[in-house]
Image (cartoon, rainbow, N blue to C red):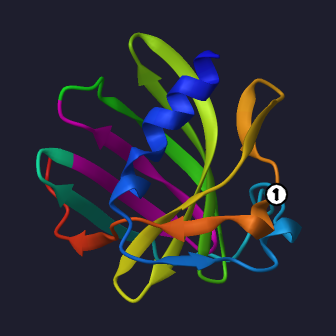
Amino acid sequence: MKYNLLFLLMTCVACNNDGSETNNGADTIKDYDTGTSSPAETISECYENINGKDTVFLSIFSQSKVITGSLVYNYYEKDKNSGTIKGNMYGDTLIADYIFSSEGITSTREVAFLKRESAFIEGYGDMQEEGGKMVFTNRSSLSFSGKPLRMVNCKEE
């Protein structure tokens, strides 16, 4: 029940749907690329969606296909949850583990974002608990909907 409520809260972004897309073939995605690769430039980018008093902020650092960063959901009059992500880009789709804290509890769930031009659109779909984290039951049926997170200047902290 705790996970269902949390997932319902997280999907609130989809309430303001301005279009949707479906990702085909994403079921073949594997876990993080843990192999070594030749040195590559690290890219840092930030994305944000402000909708009234609600904010979603994504900060990513990429080297090759490996993506790390932070993700913050700050909905007005709801508990803020923020944490880190680690995952991979598969074509135009980011699949990552999101380790976050909300109401003093640390949880892990899988997140998906579709890259479109200079924005990311979050993916939604059925989830189940597996190995102590919430994962998508069928990545190929994800719906990418809601307000896009647009590229913004990263803030120095």
Label 1 crowd (10 A; few <14 / some 14-19 / many >=20): few
84 and 150: which is toward the camera: 150
Secondary structure character of the magenta stretch overall: strand
Query: Residue 38 falls in which quadrant of the image?
Result: bottom right
Q: Please state the extent of the stretch shown in magenta in the rendering.
A: 55-76
Above or below — where is 10 with respect to 81?
Answer: below
Q: Which residue corresponds to the image point at 78% horizontal and 36% vertical from the top-left? A: 128
Residue drawn at x 30%, y 23% is 79
> Would you say 133 lies left or right of 99 here?
right
Residue drawn at x 72%, y 30% is 133
Q: Position of residue 90 (x, y in %)?
A: 69, 75
Task: Judge from the rendering whether residue 147 lies leftward or rightward of residue 100; answer left or right.
Answer: left
User: Above or below — where is 148 with respect to 57?
Assistant: below
Q: Position of residue 60 (x, y in %)?
A: 41, 60
Kind of residue sitting beneath label 1: Asn
Q: Which residue is mark 1?
A: 138
Q: Position of residue 56 (x, y in %)?
A: 29, 51
Q: How many marks?
A: 1
Q: Which quarter of the rendering shows the N terminus?
A: top right
Q: Residue furthest right?
A: 28
Q: Quadrant of residue 53?
A: top left
Q: Is residue 106 magenta?
A: no
Q: Is residue 41 above or below residue 132?
A: below
Q: Position of residue 67 (x, y in %)?
A: 55, 61
Q: Is residue 57 left or right of residue 31?
A: left
Looking at the rendered structure, the secondary structure element under dot 1 is loop
**Per the image, is 61 magenta?**
yes
